[in-house]
Amino acid sequence: MLNRIKSELLNFGLKFINVDEKIVRMLLESSSTNINEIVILPAVKMVMKKLVGKLTQKIVYGRVYNGKLNGIPVSIIRTQIGCPNAALVMECLKRSKAKIVVRVDFCGGISNSDTAIDIGDILIPNLAYCDDGTSPQYIR
């Protein structure tokens, strides 16, 4: 009986929250207002921990880690691996005040004498090919 009362109260409260906010709360366990304009999306836990470790003035809202990185307010949200997981987070960000989204992670590589790329170097591509069914939905 007590569980039914709790369920009814919860359902009553959900009637006053719009659909976009429900989606963000369900997937990120946070309100859309807790997401900063600049968002960093790591896929794996190791990268997430390193980024969160660099934040100052940390505040955690569910899966959203807020703080300042070099004095700039950012949100860090782990997407996990794969386009479907990234798309779920992007759907939430579309419903928030996020304006800049940066995907960060690591990759493998093959060394050859023609390149000056060493292990641990940071690569910033100037071009990306979107060959999945999701990415074109977020490009303006």
Image (tube, grey):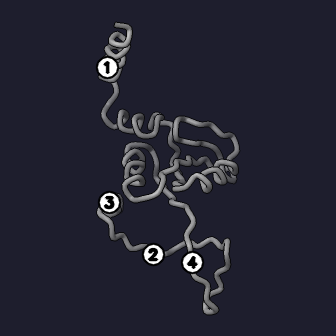
Disc 1 residue crowd, few under 14, some 14–19, many 20+, Cα 10 Å: few
Residue at which label 2 appears = 127
Residue at which label 4 appears = 109
Circle 2: residue type: Leu
Residue at which label 3 appears = 134
**In which image quadrant can residue 18 be found?**
top left
**Distance of label 4 from label 3 (alpha carbons):** 26 Å
Quadrant containing the C terminus is bottom left
Q: Position of residue 119 (x, y in %)?
A: 67, 75
Most distant residue in the top direction: 1
Circle 4: residue type: Gly
Disc 3 residue crowd, few under 14, some 14–19, many 20+, Cα 10 Å: some
Residue under the image location 61 percent in, 92 percent down: 114
69 relative position to 13: left or right: right
Q: Position of residue 90 (x, y in %)?
A: 40, 51
Foreground label between 4 and 1: 4
